[in-house]
Image (spheres, rainbow, N blue to C red):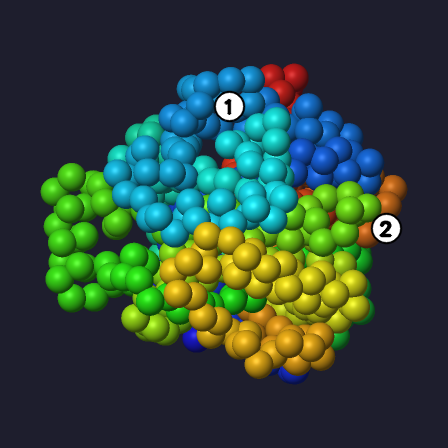
Amino acid sequence: MMLPFKWGFETEPEPGLVNRRLPLRMGRVIGGSSSVNGMCYHRGHPGIYDHWENLGCSGWGYSDVLPYFLKAETNHARQDEFHGQEGPMHITAGDDSESGFSNELDEAFINSGLAMGLQRTYDFDGSVPEGIGYEDRTIYKGVRMSTSRAYLSEAGKRSNLTVRPDSTVIRLTGESDKLSSVEYEYKGKKKVAAAEKEIVLCAGALMTPHILMHSGVGHADVLEKYGISVKKELSGVGQNLQNHPDVVCSFAINKPVSSNRFTHGLGSIVAGLQWLLFKRGPVASNHFVASAFIRTKPDIEFPDIKLTFLPCCLKDSGEILCKHGFQIDISLTQPTSPGTVQIGSADPKVPPKIALNYLTEAKDMNAMVAAVSFVRQLVFQGELEQYGTSEMSPGASMVDADSIEDWIRNSTNTTHHGVGTAKMGLESAHDTVVDCRGRLKGFPNIRIADTSIMPHIVTGGTYGPVIMIAEKISDHILNLRQAL
């Protein structure tokens, strides 16, 4: 189902989730998913980028990518060696210093985590990348800071840039084994744009492999099955799909302090007026700013669980679950069961077949079960318990591992952080799709600059990292053109 501002995809039946199909909502608007996301900003654990380099991505270690994170941002919360002050992306603190709004439940969550032995961090993107604290966010002066606002609002004024909305890319085309043009549909009519030098594909982890396969680049058996002429066999296209599964624990409280009070009635009217008049207050906040990155085992390399605190209790539809309450989202940051993206038809308009393969590995499920136990301890052994707290889900009756696992399989959703389906790495590796400059193997004039080139998923959201990727790939393009 196509939505007004999102691609309404869904997965194939997920065997690890009792064969449920999960909805996948990517931004279908200028700015892409940055125009519809949760506005959290997190780069991910620094060690992930060193891991990329160890996987064969030369020049993508943490010390290599940090300058591009700095280049992209103007951070209004802090000024130190970890943050930039001159970039187009305005980053603000997750506390109330920007929005003028805070919720006491956030601090209660943080204090409960400290009582559990977690380390307090004041900057997940600084010297202490794990523990508990506030995440930065992409909200500035009460307004979403999408890539459309940060980059295109200025770049769109240039005479050498044309932004064509209401367009859908169909495939890359070219004579013989070349790809030198973009075929797209504009207002129902087929158009072709020829490239003089390079084509940069930025369609995301789901649509980039879809476009490549319909262009004749992918696993030969798959392409031939649908009668698509093979221009280049790259078996890694559409493989290595990684994403963060997540499940939400919900709790009711008997004190009227949650953000539920701003979702209806007089509270919503007052909050709306406060934003319209001053761009401050509850509407200027994304309401999930307190987070924790934890390890379920002491010997693992990176934090494998992210906890995100929501000082409200709502369904995905926005419907209130209880009069007042809070939720803690559990996200598996390092899933070990990759999925796939495949075409299901010769018709490019048919959505891709997407398999996330969530929780098909025992290791992943064990981490999620351990995280549920940790959340319960955090809630009922700390400050959050003082609000007359009662557990709604999983539910107090679910105490043994089997029942918790059953609840997880029936309740897990996705965070929409897809990566990896056009994997970057050594050209000699059979499963890589692009080289370390983002160039498509076999096509030096085609580059990919989106989350699909990540060889391994980051520990948090992908918004910050994908901006870094775009900045770094653009430097590679610029250096090449200067050399020419």
Q: Quadrant of residue 242?
A: bottom right
Q: Is residue 39 above or below residue 97?
A: below
Q: SS of the residue at dot 2?
A: loop
Looking at the rendered image, the disc whose residue lies closer to the viewer, 2 or 1, is 1
- Residue 430's mark? 2
The image quadrant where one finds the N terminus is: bottom left
Whole-percent x and y of residue 17? 65, 77
Mark 2 neighbour class, 10 Å CA radius: few under 14, some 14 to 19, many 20 or more: few
Identify the residue shown where x is 43% and y is 49%: 108
Give whichever of 388, 395 is nearer the camera: 388
Q: Amino acid at mark 1?
A: His
With 28 as the anchor, is 375 left or right in this view? Answer: right
Q: SS of the residue at dot 1?
A: loop
Q: Is residue 264 above or below residue 437?
A: below
Whole-percent x and y of residue 296? 72, 54
Give the Cα distance between marks 2 and 1: 37 Å
Q: Quadrant of residue 358?
A: bottom right
